[in-house]
Amino acid sequence: MKNYRHLFFDLDHTLWDFEKNANETLHTLYEQHGFARYGTFSVDEFVRVYSDINHALWRMYQGNKITQPQLRELRFSRTLAKLGVPDGQVPPNISAEFTDLLPLKSAVFPYTYEVLDYLKPRYRMHLITNGFNDVQAIKLASSNLTHYFESLTTSEHSGYLKPDPRMFAHALDRTGATAAESLMIGDNLECDVLGAYNAGIDQVYFNPEKRRHFAQITHEISCLSELRNFL
């Protein structure tokens, strides 16, 4: 069994349950802005359309096709346009409201705390994420995760986005780790797994929905508790 010294975790969709926290936030916004008055879409439809559009825009952002401000603005304007809300009736501050509310949510994936409690005395642990500086630290504090990690590397810190291997190189450099003694744990085959592979880092693919794929991966898990099987 290979001896690792440094563990690099993705945050959203790996430890912090982005979908659950986003859904709660969207339910709040739906009520606060009285979207039910339109009578054309339910809160569940609002969540579904937002999720589809947000995922598509994130792929564009990760491909350097749009900027962070464009991502934040377009995900709501496009969602509400698709749902039939007239352009002049789109709440002007809804994107900022979402960005303020979301990181205050605290849902994490099952066994997150138990596994991190087990790993912390054994490894040096870090976070590497394409999330934004202004919200990631708040998410960590809200979900009581901050104390587990020595460092947080974001795309804004490094100037690169996963899967660019230069982002992983930046994280290694600032933490004093080497690729050979490091392990990346994340939910995204392209950003986390392929990105780490191209940087010479072993990978753990967190695949709770057990999606089919043909990628060559160092380790694959469907539950965070499985990390204890080899760490």
Image: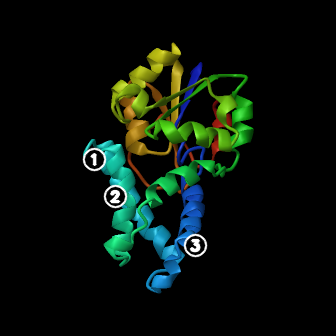
- Give the alpha-carbon distance from disc 1 to disc 2, as whole Å: 10 Å
Between 148 and 81, the one nearer to me in the picture: 81
Residue 73 picture location, percent across and down = 36, 55
Image quarter in which the N terminus is found: top right
Q: Is residue 3 visible?
A: no
Q: What numbered label is drawn on residue 152?
A: none
* Vertical order, 11 against 78 (above or below): above
Q: Which residue is depicted at the point 62% across and 39% down? A: 140
SS at badge 1: loop
Residue occupying image coordinates x 40% and y 62%? 76
The three-letter amino acid code for the residue at tag 3 is Glu
Whether residue 113 sits left or right of residue 91 in the image: it is: right
Task: Residue at 68%, 50% (x, y): give it.
Answer: 110
Classify mark 2: helix, strand or loop.
Answer: helix
**Which is nearer the N-term, disc 1 or disc 2?**
1
Residue under numbered circle 3: 31
**Place of residue 85 in the rendered image (x, y in percent of width and height, measured from the top left):** 37, 76
Label 1: which residue?
66
Q: Label 2: how many residues lie within 10 Å, few (<14), some (14-19) or many (20+)?
A: some
Q: Are marks 1 and 2 in contact (CB under 8 Å)?
A: yes
Q: Determine contact: label 3, label 2, CB under 8 Å.
A: no
Mark toward the start of the polypeptide (1 vs 3)? 3
